[in-house]
Image (cartoon, grey):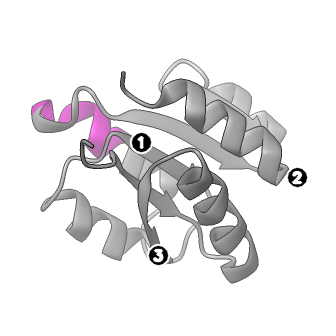
Amino acid sequence: MSEKPFSLVVEDDPDLANIFSEAVNAAGFKTDIIVNGRLALERLKEIAPHLVILDMHLPEVSGRDILAYIRNEPRLDKTIVVIATADALMGEEMRDQADFVLIKPITFSQLRDMSARLKPA
């Protein structure tokens, strides 16, 4: 059996982070949770995840800056970014830069099913 693809859940709300992580795990990913933007950038300098679930409103470094880093880093050009935000206007603004935008509240099954479709073959 091949190794599970890797994902990052970047979300500062601990309850949502756990739900998102469990949903992505249920879809067959290995997942790490990161709770602030600075730590997310540090981690992205070390790894190239297949999937990133990204909140936009984070402490220290914004989700917008993290998305810009991912899109400008050639090593991360295959990383799929799913924005998870309660800010519908920001979600619409970021739609052309992200692969997908989900507006909170996001259900466990919604994120699990989407993640399963994004899993590499």
Q: Is residue 5 visible?
A: yes
Mark 2: which amino acid?
A: Pro
**Label 1 vs 2, first from the N-terminus:** 1
- State which mark lies toward you, 3 or 2: 2
Question: For the residues marked 3 and 1, what is the alpha-carbon distance in whole angstroms?
Answer: 17 Å
Position of the N terminus by quadrant? top left
Mark 3: which amino acid?
A: Asn
Left or right? Give the position of 74 relative to 52.
left
Per the rendered image, the range of residues in magenta is: 68-74
Mark 2 = which residue? 105
Relative height, residue 94 to residue 68 (above, below): above
Mark 1: which amino acid?
A: Leu
Write down the quadrant of residue 13 in the picture: bottom right
Mark 1 = which residue? 51
Bin the neighbour count of mark 3 within 10 Å (Cα to Cα): few under 14, some 14-19, many 20 and up. many
Relative height, residue 4 to residue 12 (above, below): above
Position of the C terminus by quadrant? top left
Residue occupying the point 65% across, 73% down: 18
Bin the neighbour count of mark 2 within 10 Å (Cα to Cα): few under 14, some 14-19, many 20 and up. few
**Label 3 vs 1, first from the N-terminus:** 3
SS type, badge 2: loop
- Disc number at residue 6? none
Q: Is there CB contact under 8 Å for labels 1 and 2?
A: no
Asked if residue 92 is among those painted magenta in the image, a careful observer would answer: no
Mark 3 = which residue? 36
Question: For the residues marked 1 and 2, what is the alpha-carbon distance in whole angstroms?
Answer: 20 Å
